[in-house]
Image (cartoon, rainbow, N blue to C red):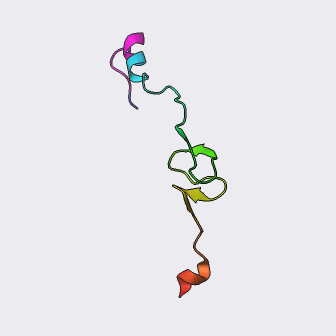
Amino acid sequence: MAVQKSRVTRSRRGQRRSHDGLKNEALTVCQVTGETHRRHHVTKTGFYRGQPVKPAAKADVAE
């Protein structure tokens, strides 16, 4: 079992955790629908970067 050699100070512990804080999500507005959505994600109406996104049909994949 791993056992620390010496106690980690509050300062050292805080420095390690400095990047763990929650950040606000980056939001953008869809060019077509004007809907606010997360960056690099498909909107609820099915658009990504102004283009409609359609899921591939399983029948098309089998051909």
In the displayed structure, 20 sits above or below 10; it is below
> Is 28 on the left-hand or right-hand side of 14?
right
The reply to whether the magenta stretch includes residue 58 is no
* Left or right, residue 18 beside residue 49: left
* Nearer the observer, 20 or 8: 20
Residue 14 lies in quadrant: top left
Within the image, what quadrant is residue 62 found in? bottom right
Where does the image place residue 3, in percent across and percent down from the top left? 38, 25
Question: Does any portion of residue 19 appear in the rendered image?
Answer: yes
Residue located at (63% from left, 47% from top) = 34
Nearest the viewer among 37 and 9 is 37
Q: Residue furthest left?
A: 5
Above or below, 53 relative to 40: below
At a point 33% along the width and 19% down the height, the residue shown is 5
Q: Which residues are magenta?
A: 3-12
Decide whether the magenta segment is chiefly helix, strand or loop.
Answer: loop
- State whether residue 9 appears in this view: no
Q: Who's the residue at 63% across and 59% down the image?
A: 46
Vertical relation: 24 (above or below) 50: above
Number of marks present in the image shown: 0
Q: Residue at x 61, y 77 (%)?
A: 57
Percent x, y for residue 30? Answer: 58, 49
In this view, the residue in front, 37 or 8, is 37
Residue lying at the far bottom in this picture: please name it. 63
Horizontal and vertical percent position of residue 49: 51, 55
Side (left or right) of 35 relative to 9:
right
